[in-house]
Amino acid sequence: MIEFRRPVPILSILGSMGKLKILDLLSKELELNVTAIVKKSKLNHTSVKFHLQELLKWEIIKEKRFGRIKIYLINDEFEVGYKLKKFLQEWDLNNRIDREKI
């Protein structure tokens, strides 16, 4: 069930290429650890950790722990996380369709 929580500074998310890259990866891969996010996003480790902390603070993503390993995923129980995930998945699908037309 989708929950409604405190306001999220959406411009801080949409205005950040780093956060968008991370969210885009998580919308496709569903769950990733920090190393995989760094490798796939081509962002440095410090930037990825910073963006993950911000997204966790806003509850856009959530973290699963397996001992020392942390796995990140979009929090689709939270309305904003759910809508961002759907938007990014649809955006990717539309861009693929547009590229095929060329």
Image (cartoon, rainbow, N blue to C red):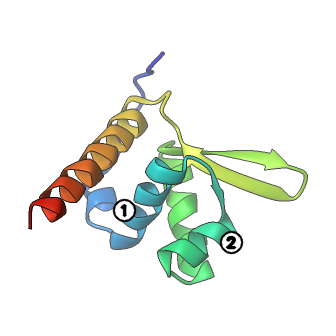
Disc 2 and disc 1: Cα gap in Å? Answer: 17 Å
Outermost residue on the front side: it is 101
The front one of 42 and 60 is 42
User: Which residue is the site of mark 2?
Assistant: 35
Residue 68 x %, y %:
87, 58
The front one of 84 and 50 is 84
Residue 91 x %, y %:
24, 50
Residue 46 x %, y %:
60, 80
Query: Does 97 sit left or right of 87 as displayed?
Result: left
- Tell me the element at label 1: helix
Q: Marks 1 and 2: in contact by CB < 8 Å?
A: no
Is tag 2's residue or tag 1's residue first in the polypeptide sequence?
A: 1
Above/below status of 26 relative to 36:
above
Task: Please state which amino acid type lies under the numbered disc 2.
Answer: Thr
- Tell me the element at label 2: helix
Outermost residue on the right side: it is 67
User: Which residue is the site of mark 1?
Assistant: 20
Outermost residue on the top side: it is 1
Task: Please state which amino acid type lies under the numbered disc 1.
Answer: Leu
